[in-house]
Amino acid sequence: MEERKERRIIMFPLPFLGHFNPMIKLAGIFHRSGFSVTILHTSFNPPDPSLYPEFTFRTIHHNNEGEEEDPLAQPEASGMDLVAFIRLLRQTYAEPFRESLTAQVGGGEKVCCLVSDVVWGKNTEDAAEEVGIRRMVLSTSGAASFCAYAAYPLLRDKHYLPIQDSRLDEPVTELTPLKVKDLPVMETNEPEELFRVVNNMVKGAKSSSGIIWNTFEDLERPSLMALNSELQVPIFLIGPFHKHTDSFLPTTKSKEDHVTTDWLDKQDPKSVIYVSFGSLADIEEKEFLEIAWGLRNSQRPFLWVVRPGLVRGTEWLESLSREFIDNISRKGKIVKWVNQLEVLAHPAVGAFWTHCGWNSTLESICEGVPMICTPCFTDQRVNARYIVDVWQAGVMLERSKMDRKEIEKVIRSVIIEEGDGLTEMCLKWKERAKVCLSKDGSSSRYLEKLVTHVLSIDS
Ligand code: UDX
């Protein structure tokens, strides 16, 4: 164990929370397995190193930083064209990343490998080759959605993509149980760039020395078998990451976290609907108002995360009148952010109305909380289909059908009537997620293989 501490792994996360969270947890897993870890991170959206004293942090700066024409000088990631933004991130940091990696590897300490977010694509490959280290990738989304990304060329050939409104409900027979409307795309002014980003990501995964997945075998076996034959590189399914590394979670709790917990403590068991659409998705003001009315009319207690920037064109809650807020505050609580892991683990929470980001999906599965699925873009659409049709751990509430009446009906079906065997299925998945991390569980075995693999590729 001590011996390995002199072996360092360099990690390069994508600077969005849904990507950074799993990467930092993976860093914790490596650290507990005896490796030292350096996190190379972009100057855009930098993490707070003081929260993770176990790791070394190095900031990668880019050339136009602080200048008037700095293309990345935006306070928030939400509301932007994400495809265009990812292209910009890749271009901006390609050279600074190469320089930074060279400096780290030249530091005298033995570096085993680079682990970069799969979305950085092949860009990181040349840099790793140049300094003579191998590159593994972390996929922060699930295996089922990666299958759909890997099938992009076929989906184009068969004209499923670009999506035509007239075909939304058609099954994609090559990717059962997906329908055309579930394919992982997103709104963008640069549709061709989306294809390039996805193809580059899949190529980068294929040419890597291994792919690490935040998922577990029992949950995604068929998709993983398909990926194994498609990608032809070693695959390591060691999720759910957050259940390995409790000791690496920041322990400081904000005043707001305490207020939220106090409020949850006062609610009946399994009575609260927790609503959150993650860190990037945004919605129209009209949709926001339907959600507000739907929650109010459901008469159920709710905890609603309205992230500043969630509602397009507004700061926070200004579309709601003071009277309306006072009225709904008798039943529910609106906050800007919560500690989601703690909220989902609280006994008062009976359902999670989610955008189905992969982290949220796994976190809900691990706590046995049924989901109401309103996917917004990319992998969230695939995840939602699997949650509802395959894992039977939730119900669908499509964005296009999200009016106050439908919202009230769906909330009641999940919280009051407890759906058709939904609770039992969710508890089953919770148990399975626990088993995979037990001593002989699949994720524990994959982790052993991963450690051996990393040590074998570092020469
Ligand atoms: C996005 C994609 O949706 C996701 O599928 C992809 O794999 C990563 O990038 P995001 O939209 O932010 O991520 O959603 P999600 O994957 O669910 O990640 C959100 C994270 O923020 C979760 O770990 C969640 O616990 C955390 N969170 C969210 C909080 O801690 N508090 C909140 O109030 C909301």
Image (cartoon, helix red, strand yellow):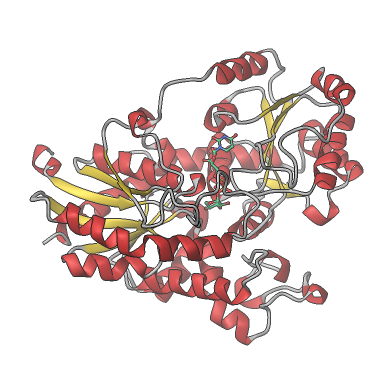
Vertical placement of residue 386 versus 228, above or below? above
Vertical placement of residue 275 versus 259, above or below? below
**Front residue (pair 139, 19):** 19
Q: Quadrant of residue 95?
A: bottom left
Image quadrant where one finds the N terminus: top left
**Front residue (pair 40, 10):** 40
Relative horizontal placement of residue 144, taking residue 229 as reference (left or right): right
Vertical placement of residue 213 versus 121, above or below? above
Image quadrant where one finds the C terminus: bottom left
Q: Quadrant of residue 274?
A: top right
Tell me residue 111's x, y (percent): 16, 53
Q: Residue at horizontal 62%, vertical 65%?
A: 184
Would you say residue 177 is visible in this rendering? no
Q: Residue at horizontal 53%, vertical 45%?
A: 359
Relative horizontal placement of residue 245, taking residue 8 as reference (left or right): right
Would you say residue 404 is visible in this rendering? yes
Tell me residue 91's x, y (percent): 42, 66
